[in-house]
Amino acid sequence: MTVSKIDLLNKQFSRGLLGYSRMEVDQFMLELAEVLGDAADAQKGMRKKIKRLESALKEYRRRDETLRDTLMSTQKMVDDLKVAAGREAQLILDEARAKADDTVRKGHNRLAQIHEEIESLKRTRTQFEVQLKGMLNAHLEMLERSDPEREKVEEIESKLKYLKKVE
């Protein structure tokens, strides 16, 4: 049963000889006591529920703060990792560039050395060709020069051939 403020203000008791009817007032008081008891119980239940909800809200806020802190820490860690990875990548690139420059420099030096060796071999070949030509020319001159003994040997050989034929 519920009793509203309007019900209280509009409630009229019948009058008797000594005032209001005692039975109606007692009945109404019982109704009011029941309504107030129910309201007090409901209020007590609501206060407990509010305390539980406030406690849960505090817990959720604490968790939210913890999650926020964790998220911030994670974000900072990710940022730090990105910076560290960037530095490491730059170091690797610098090292790779240094190795590449060193390799290119060694390649250029080796190429210059090979060119020097080729030029040296060309000079050696030219010297060898000149010496060989000189030697061949000297031998050719020797062969072409008439040697008196050779002519005598040839003359004797031709006479021998003739004598062999005659026989």
Image (spheres, rainbow, N blue to C red):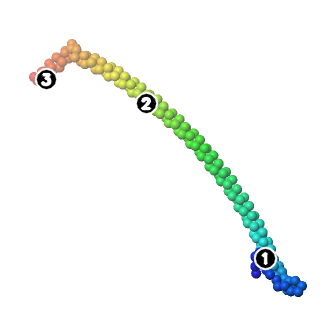
Quarter of the view holding residue 116: top left
> What residue did someone put label 1 on?
9
Q: Nearer the viewer, residue 84 or 3?
A: 3
Marking on residue 83: none
Asked whether the viewer can see residue 151, the reply is: yes
Residue sitting at 21 percent across and 14 percent down?
146
Q: Position of residue 102 (x, y in %)?
A: 51, 33
Asked whether the viewer can see residue 128, the reply is: no
Type of amino acid at the residue the image marks with label 1 = Leu
Q: Nearer the viewer, mark 3 or mark 2?
A: 2
Residue sitting at 27 percent across and 18 percent down?
137
Q: Nearer the viewer, residue 29 or 100?
A: 29
Type of amino acid at the residue the image marks with label 2 = Leu
Q: Are marks 1 and 2 in contact (CB under 8 Å)?
A: no
Residue sitting at 25 percent across and 19 percent down?
140
Residues at marks 1 and 3, CA–CA distance in whole angstroms? 181 Å
> What residue did someone put label 3 on?
164
Quarter of the view holding residue 2: bottom right
For the C terminus, the quadrant is top left
Q: Position of residue 143 (x, y in %)?
A: 24, 18
Q: Position of residue 1 (x, y in %)?
A: 76, 81
**Earlier-in-chain disc, 1 versus 2:** 1
Q: Secondary structure at mark 1?
A: helix
- The residue furthest top is 148
Determine whether, in the image, residue 88 is placed left or right of residue 58: left
Q: Position of residue 94 (x, y in %)?
A: 55, 37
Type of amino acid at the residue the image marks with label 3 = Lys
Residue sitting at 60 percent across and 44 percent down?
83
> What residue did someone put label 2 on?
111
Question: With respect to residue 124, does 95 lie above or below?
Answer: below
